[in-house]
Image (cartoon, rainbow, N blue to C red):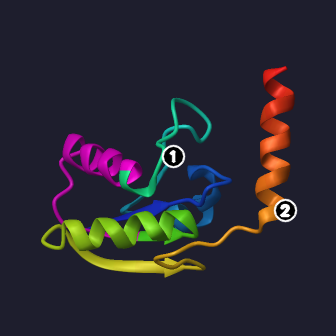
């Protein structure tokens, strides 16, 4: 059975290096837009991407481990596709993720500076 690690919003698959070294039949996924490609605009969009990824890899039964946003993706994936998902490992996450307004304002300002 495969163990799939899903990172949070600010990272990539390399965050799980120690886990993938320890769990030999595991994969750390880098979501689109983290650090390559177009990011999805929603958790649902990442779930759709993950569904395509698991189908292309021909993974049938697997456990999803997700941190923060990755946990929200894992949770929704498990709800949508319970017959595929054998388990969930949820780390620092929830069905609703709150972000400090000051952090959102800072990220918006950084994005506006890049576009100038």
Question: Looking at this rendering, what residue extends furthest in the left direction?
Answer: 83
Task: Between label 2 and label 1, give the one nearer the viewer.
Answer: 2
Compared with residue 96, is residue 34 higher up or lower down, i.e. above or below? above
Observer-nearest of 84 and 78: 78
Residue to which mark 2 is pinned: 102
Residue 15 in sight in this render:
yes
Q: Residue at x 51, y 62 (%)?
A: 20
Counting from the top left corner in percent of width and height, residue 54 is at 26, 50
Compared with residue 58, is residue 97 higher up or lower down, i.e. above or below? below
Residue 2 in sight in this render:
no
Q: Quadrant of the N terminus?
A: bottom left
Q: Residue at x 78, y 64 (%)?
A: 101
Image disc number at residue 72: none
Compared with residue 114, is residue 101 higher up or lower down, i.e. above or below? below
Q: Which residues are magenta?
A: 45-64
Local SS, label 1 = loop
Image disc number at residue 30: 1
Dot 1 crowding, Cα within 10 Å, few <14, some 14–19, many 20+: some
Counting from the top left corner in percent of width and height, residue 17 is at 60, 58
Question: Looking at this rendering, what residue extends furthest in the top direction?
Answer: 116
């Amino acid at each position: 059975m495969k163990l799939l690690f899903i990172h949070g919003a600010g990272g990539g698959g390399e965050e799980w290096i120690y886990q993938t070294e320890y769990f030999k039949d595991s994969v750390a996924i880098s979501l689109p837009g983290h650090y390559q490609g177009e990011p999805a605009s929603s958790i649902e969009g990442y779930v759709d991407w993950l569904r395509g990824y698991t189908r292309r890899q021909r993974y049938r039964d697997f456990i999803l481990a997700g941190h923060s946003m990755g946990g929200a993706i894992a949770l929704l994936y498990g709800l949508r596709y319970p017959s595929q998902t054998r388990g969930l490992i949820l780390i620092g996450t929830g069905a609703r993720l709150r972000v400090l307004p000051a952090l959102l304002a800072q990220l918006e300002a950084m994005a506006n500076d890049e576009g100038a």
